[in-house]
Amino acid sequence: MALRDRFSKKLSCPQCGNEGFAEASEVDDPKRKHPDFKVDQLPRGFGVQRPSNNQENFMIKCECGRKFPFRSVAEAAAERR
């Protein structure tokens, strides 16, 4: 069984400014097709809109109604540099 990488990410709603830290994890095995991404804990005021195995497709919903990805495509591209 592969180990899971655990990390925190600051979420900030671009519409209302609601913010907090989410705890997430994914499998630490680059050979896997899907990293089995999971949000283990969300801050108050945020919920899951659409779960996904990838951070870029995992959608968060703020209590104000704004929906946004857990990790933007720009964040992912900056990480690959």
Image (spheres, helix red, strand yellow):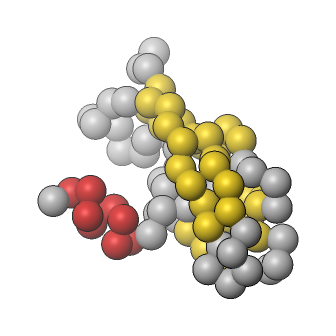
Q: Which quarter of the rendered picture does the N terminus lie within? A: top left
Q: In percent of the image, x 68 and y 62: which residue is there? A: 19
Q: Which quarter of the rendered picture does the C terminus lie within? A: bottom left
Is 7 left, or right, of 44 in this rendering? left
58 or 75, which is in the foreground?
A: 75
Asked whether residue 28 is in view, the answer is yes
56 or 43, which is in the foreground?
A: 43
Percent x, y for residue 25? 53, 36
Percent x, y for residue 54? 48, 54
**The image quarter in which residue 64 lies:** bottom right
Return the residue found at the far bottom.
15
Percent x, y for residue 16? 73, 80
Q: In percent of the image, x 82 and y 54: which residue is there? A: 44
Q: In percent of the image, x 56 and y 61: which residue is there? A: 70
Return the residue found at the far top.
1
In this view, 12 is above or below 3: below
Is 23 left, or right, of 6 in this rendering? right
Percent x, y for residue 31? 27, 35
12 or 35, which is in the foreground?
A: 12
Return the residue found at the far left.
81
**The image quarter in which residue 78 lies:** bottom left
Is 80 left, or right, of 59 in this rendering? left
